[in-house]
Image (spheres, rainbow, N blue to C red):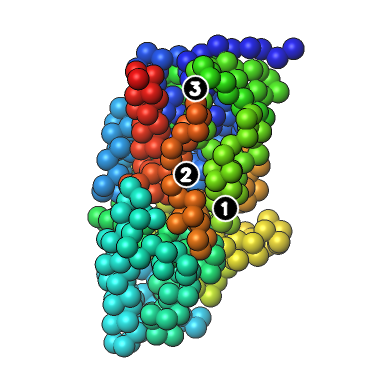
């Protein structure tokens, strides 16, 4: 027999959006039950501790200026932040040749390509400012921008060459998808929600500036401790039925009767739930049109962050590699040292088709080529294929293809009866990030409070 639970609000999903919503509702003296399909908390974040206690982040991990709600929640849970290591020389690999450089732009780009890159970034920022964050589909040129892809815009507005390649790689890594799949309007909205493109992609003063001591799991663990046995893991939701005065949320393990429900899982996962009555056709079709991309995140752990002593920041880019991007992911104290490698889109799908040993070899070869032979002496290797996560199946932000925002965007945030929607994709500030997920959870908690008072 399944257990029947009665509560004020049922929250589906125990990532940052769902747990933040549950926490704020709990603090407002409303009873909550959280149902999470996976065996762990975190959603698209995932903190692991190795046998020696080393913290490895398998998913989202970085914070930066402007992400006020994430910093506030961390402080509330007693979790401190520390700066991402960014001192030293960066690496750009071009035509197989390693180039070390300092500052924002690599050498050897050439004045024409450099000027073209700067103009393109400035133009994207300028266009992004014209996109209303509350309703990007209401921008004056929304339909024109939504009818084209990021790739088609780059093809028309940048010169062929290394400048276009660098900008395309940056945008590709943000959406973890081929840029021919991403609406220009979505890209402009995301850029605006993170201030500008430079802020979105830099370490010091940017979105990758800080990390959490103990990882994102330390914050989530603090929330879990406050919610206690209200959180149920390995409990996938099968069905949500609503009537005039409440909802029934059904899983194999339990049935929850509540006044309202918050759905705080990726759109593709939310689309697997049976809704009774069925969702309005626009909302149902929106869920079908918000896929996640593909991403591998690999952590290579060393006895010490030797690259720092060798004058490297740990940041590198090789657009021709299956693992194009690296960042220093070491903890607040060292040893050990950790380097993260990332592959997204087609490169991620390629890595899925080879063996673990082949991926490990590719990662170490990439690091050795960029930073030297010390990269061969590995202590631990941890890999995460987000497309293989059964209740997520991709990462890290759902993309909107051409035409989706202008056609279905108005259905993104409004509740459907007693069903409320959270998740970083619903955020208007820091859309796609951890902070955006937190903001969405707080928004939906306020939304429920207002609805219950009316």
| For residue 203, above or below residue 113 | above
Outermost right residue: 1
Residue 3 image point, x, y percent: 66, 12
* Secondary element at image label 2: helix
Q: Residues within 10 Å of mark 2 (few under 14, many from 20)?
A: some
Q: Which mark is residue 411?
A: 2
In the picture, the quarter occupied by the N terminus is top right
Marks 1/2 in contact by CB < 8 Å: the verdict is no
Image-based side of 119 in relation to 91, left or right: left
Q: Residues within 10 Å of mark 3 (few under 14, many from 20)?
A: many
Residue 94 in view here: yes
Judging depth in this view, the residue of 257 and 408 nearest the camera is 408
Residue at point 35% right, 20% down? Answer: 454
Residue at point 28% right, 34% down? Answer: 72
Q: Which mark is residue 260?
A: 3
Image quadrant where residue 271 sits: top right
Q: Earlier in the sequence, mark 2 or mark 3?
A: 3
Marks 3/1 in contact by CB < 8 Å: the verdict is no
Residue 307 image point, x, y percent: 40, 61
Tell me the CA gap for discs 3 and 1.
25 Å
What residue is pinned by disc 1? 289
């Amino acid at each position: 027999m399944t257990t029947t639970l009665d509560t004020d609000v049922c929250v589906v999903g125990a990532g940052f959006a769902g747990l933040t919503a549950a926490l704020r509702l709990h603090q407002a003296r409303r009873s909550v039950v959280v149902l999470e399909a996976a065996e762990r908390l975190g959603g698209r974040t995932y903190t692991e501790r190795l046998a020696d206690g080393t913290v490895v982040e398998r998913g989202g991990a970085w914070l930066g200026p402007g992400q006020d709600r994430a910093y506030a929640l961390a402080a509330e849970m007693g979790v401190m932040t520390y700066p991402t290591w960014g001192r030293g020389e960066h690496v750009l690999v071009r035509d197989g040749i390693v180039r070390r450089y300092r500052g924002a732009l690599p050498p050897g780009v050439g004045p024409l390509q450099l000027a073209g890159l700067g103009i393109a970034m400035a133009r994207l920022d300028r266009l992004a400012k014209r996109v209303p964050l509350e309703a990007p589909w209401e921008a004056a040129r929304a339909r024109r921008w939504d009818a084209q892809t990021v790739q088609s815009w780059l093809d028309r507005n940048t010169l062929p060459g290394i400048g276009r390649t660098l900008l395309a790689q940056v945008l590709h890594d943000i959406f973890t998808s081929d840029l021919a799949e991403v609406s220009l309007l979505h890209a402009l909205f995301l850029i605006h929600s993170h201030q500008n493109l430079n802020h979105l992609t830099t370490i010091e003063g940017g979105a990758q500036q800080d990390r959490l001591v103990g990882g994102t799991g330390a914050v989530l663990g603090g929330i879990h401790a406050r919610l206690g046995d209200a959180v149920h893991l390995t409990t996938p939701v099968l069905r949500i039925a609503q009537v005039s005065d409440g909802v029934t949320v059904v899983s194999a393990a339990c049935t929850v009767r509540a006044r309202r429900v918050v759905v705080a899982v990726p759109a593709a996962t939310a689309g697997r739930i049976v809704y009774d009555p069925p969702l309005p056709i626009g909302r149902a079709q929106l869920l079908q049109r918000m896929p996640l991309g593909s991403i591998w995140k690999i952590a290579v752990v060393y006895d010490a962050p030797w690259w720092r002593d060798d004058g490297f920041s740990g940041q590198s880019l090789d657009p021709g590699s299956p693992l194009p991007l690296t960042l220093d992911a070491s903890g607040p104290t060292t040893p050990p040292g950790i380097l993260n490698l990332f592959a997204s889109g087609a490169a991620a799908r390629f890595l899925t088709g080879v063996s673990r040993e082949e991926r490990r070899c590719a990662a170490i070869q990439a690091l050795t080529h960029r930073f030297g032979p010390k990269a061969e002496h590995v202590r631990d290797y941890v890999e995460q294929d987000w497309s293989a996560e059964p209740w997520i199946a991709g990462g890290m932000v759902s993309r909107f293809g051409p035409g989706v925002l202008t056609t279905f965007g108005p259905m993104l945030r409004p509740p459907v009866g007693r069903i409320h929607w959270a998740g970083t994709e619903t955020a208007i500030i820091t859309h796609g990030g951890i902070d955006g997920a937190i903001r969405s959870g707080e928004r939906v908690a306020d939304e429920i409070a207002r609805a219950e008072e009316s």
